[in-house]
Image (tube, grey):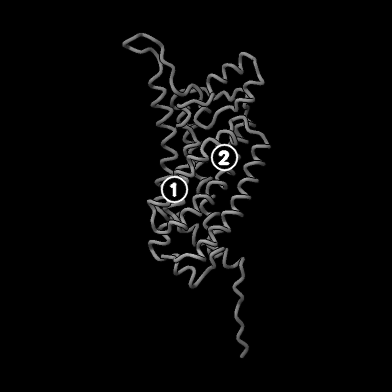
């Protein structure tokens, strides 16, 4: 009797890992809590901040609301584009969409929520003993890193899209204008694509910190938040509301470089350190 054993190739291992990780992601209560928060947050921000606009009952002075345009909660117009256009319309757009302290409440804050998703998703593997089991019977360290990166990237993209939906609902409820100004519809589309692709830069950063901290969730989240703060000002520069194809290309290239480089570092950490 001829006994044949099927070869466990890289493709089959990765497919199996992806199937398991996607199932775990989409059956995890935490993911739906974070996604739900991404939907509700922009609605509350836009509605509540718009309520503070109008005349001050004590002084009688007119108080401008924090958000005067729906697209402010997505991103801001890049300074160079506004400076290049000196028309009255551009000046109005600049006043409505410029980057200031109130714009800290926009979509860019999601990159910290992505850190929460990645850190909790990875640390659970080490707390439950799942990682030790998976490396023993199913996959290699590189398979694990690739699978976690891909699944967390998809989860991050869903969070951004859900936030966008919430922003549109919040803008409609608050009665804010949807005029895209000098950005145009094309700029908004490119902005959203750039923001999704930029998560491919942040996910491997949070992943390498998470596999280094392992079951110490508090540690992985603290250092991930610190890394996010260091790179935070890069987000509005890379993904302005008036983004173009160059922004998309730069985010795509950055994601590829960070995934390859930090993926290798994550793989090395898993190989050289204990899994507990």
Residue sitting at the far top:
60
Q: Secondary structure at mark 2?
A: helix
Residue 195's disc number: 2
82 to the left or right of 145? right
Q: Find residue 98 and report its horizontal and vertical position in percent.
A: 54, 24
Residue 128's disc number: none
Residue drawn where x is 38% and y is 61% of the image: 127
Is residue 91 or residue 169 the one in the foreground? 91
Is residue 234 or residue 149 the one in the foreground? 234
Is residue 155 or residue 239 the one in the foreground? 239
* 155 to 11, vertically: above or below: above
* 35 to 59, vertically: above or below: below
Residue drawn where x is 43% and y is 59% of the image: 214
Q: Which residue is mark 1?
A: 223
Residue drawn where x is 55% and y is 33% of the image: 236
Choose the circle earlier in sequence order: 1 or 2: 2
Which quadrant holds residue 87?
top right
* 214 to 252, vertically: above or below: below
């Amino acid at each position: 009797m001829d006994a044949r054993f099927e070869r466990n190739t890289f493709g089959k291992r990765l497919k199996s890992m992806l199937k398991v990780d996607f199932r775990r992601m989409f059956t995890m209560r935490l993911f739906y809590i974070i996604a739900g928060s991404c939907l509700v947050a922009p609605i509350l921000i836009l509605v509540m901040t718009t309520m503070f606009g109008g005349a001050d009952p004590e002084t009688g002075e007119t108080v401008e609301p924090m958000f005067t345009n729906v697209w402010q909660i997505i991103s801001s117009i890049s300074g160079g584009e506004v400076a290049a256009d000196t028309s009255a319309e551009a000046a109005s757009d600049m006043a409505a969409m410029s980057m200031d302290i109130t714009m800290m409440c926009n979509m860019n804050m999601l990159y910290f929520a992505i850190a929460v998703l990645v850190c909790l998703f990875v640390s659970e593997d080490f707390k439950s003993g799942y990682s030790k089991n998976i490396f023993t019977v199913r996959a290699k360290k590189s398979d694990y890193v690739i699978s976690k990166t891909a699944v967390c990237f998809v989860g991050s993209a869903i969070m951004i899209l859900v936030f966008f939906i919430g922003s549109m609902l919040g803008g409609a409820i608050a009665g804010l204008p949807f005029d895209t100004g000098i950005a145009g519809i094309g700029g908004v589309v490119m902005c959203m694509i750039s923001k999704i692709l930029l998560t491919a830069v942040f996910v491997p950063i949070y992943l390498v910190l998470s596999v280094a901290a392992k079951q110490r969730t508090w540690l992985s989240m603290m250092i991930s938040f610190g890394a996010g703060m260091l790179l935070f000002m890069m987000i509005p520069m890379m993904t302005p509301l008036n983004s173009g194809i160059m922004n998309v290309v730069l985010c795509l290239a950055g994601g590829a470089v960070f995934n390859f480089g930090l993926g290798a570092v994550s793989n090395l950490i898993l190989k050289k350190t204990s899994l507990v």
